[in-house]
Amino acid sequence: MRVYLVTLGCPKNEVISDNMAQLLMEAGHIIVAEPRSADALLVNTCGFIKSARLESSQTVLELAERKKDAQKLVVIGCWPQLVGPQILTDFPTVDGLLGVRRWMEIDRLLTFLDAGVEQKIIWLNDLPDSSLAFRAGRPLRSRPGASAYVSIADGCSAGCAFCSIPNIKGKLRSRLAADILDEVRYLVDGGARELILVAQDTTAYGLDRGEKDGLPHLLRQIVKNAPELVWLRLMYAYPQHVTPQLIATMAEEPKLCHYLDLPLQHAHPQTLQRMRRPHNVKEIRRTLNALRTAMPDIALRTSFIVGYPGETEEEFRALLDFVEEVAFDKVGVFMYSREAGTPAYDLPDQIPQPMKEERYHRLMQVQQAISLARNRAQIGRELDVLVEGQGDGISVGRSYRDAPEVDGLVIFKGRAPVGEFVRVRVVGADTYDLTGSWLRRRRTADSYSDKRPPVKP
């Protein structure tokens, strides 16, 4: 069959879509770029919050309205896992639903549909043998490039009150290290220079198997088994699981980017308690200080939720003060989304939308000034930049301080080779991006930054 596949949501969904594409191609299917030329239309959806579900429904609606009689339409992933067969009621032309733990059965599902099965296919329940490591010893990714995501676990056991991920994906399941290392080897052999480890909580890796400090051990294994790798980046760290061993590993291994995405969600103890998050703010400060002491040049990214039920002006003010005190390099701000089925849904004192928006803008205004100052502190540094594009006499790329799609860029004159590292001296900065001068000399093996602590803003 000719298959059109569209992916919505987070990088973890991109990994799953790449894996599905690999399976389909191995089974003899052809991936096509346009829905009109496809026999099957696949939508890998996100259902995390209301806006994500709206995007999923709009995408399915657009495909359903243009769907030809002979085409099959399958909705995959988080959205059908969360809302179930209601999708078939709302979109009668959908032919099948495939859940988050059964995506590896995509070829089998298409085989059923191609055989003319008349009833709708609903495969949402777990299989006893389904896991991310279902093909032990074989690489899963199909599209290696200069940067690639590697999913090291699925599900989450943290139990945050606002989060629907446990309802969608279940408890934490860590992949086997051997399977991760096989995938890493495959990607690096295919040309990947940067690997980005993702999970709902990367720092919980191995805890479901009783492993303490499973992530630092995995990181050292990856570095040892892929010496050609230049950058290894961590996303989605949980503050309670950032251990001294993890900090030491990040500081000691040159290939580990001095960058950490550490979503804190809030900074007032009572708000964090209602969120069912780690609420010892003093301990969080100690962790942040330990990271900066071990790696003075580390770029710290976090995210916060404003407008959580019961958030008082005093609690929000404490969040603003915390942000000003810590001076994160990057901050994402989200307005609380009330999600049915989560413990927070029934909390009293829900915050009106206008107040959420007002607090969102206040926090963003504070952080934008900090981000500008942190970026200006980079002026004069020499950074290695992974080139991602070029045009109109300029090139754009990322330094170790920036993750793909969520952070800023380094922009400089000249047509540098895409997919390669070049050395750039930072000469200017704005709130999100840096400008630089291409030094046109070869990088050294361990020079992802010049190791100089940035000047404090």
Image (cartoon, grey):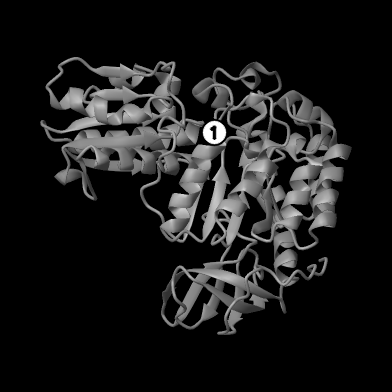
Q: Quadrant of residue 409?
A: bottom right
**Quadrant, the C terminus:** bottom right
Residue 160 seen in this snapshot = no
Residue 221 in the image, given as x and y percentages of width and height: 62, 47
Q: Residue at x 75, y 66 (%)?
A: 373
Q: Amino acid at mark 1?
A: Leu
Q: Nearer the viewer, residue 200 or 245?
A: 245
Q: Is residue 176 above or below residue 116?
A: below
Q: Nearer the viewer, residue 313 or 304?
A: 304
Q: Residues within 10 Å of mark 1 (few under 14, many from 20)?
A: some
Picture layout, residue 337 above or below residue 194: above
Q: Secondary structure at mark 1?
A: loop
Taking depth in this image into account, of 217 and 35 the one nearest to the observer is 217
Q: Is residue 107 left or right of residue 178?
A: left
Residue 128 coordinates in the image, percent (x, y): 44, 16
Give how far across and how far down residue 306 sits, in percent.
Answer: 68, 38
Q: Is residue 105 above or below residue 419?
A: above
Residue located beneath label 1 in the image: 176
**In which quarter of the view is residue 16 placed?**
top left
- Pinpoint residue 181: horizontal percent, then vertical percent: 52, 44
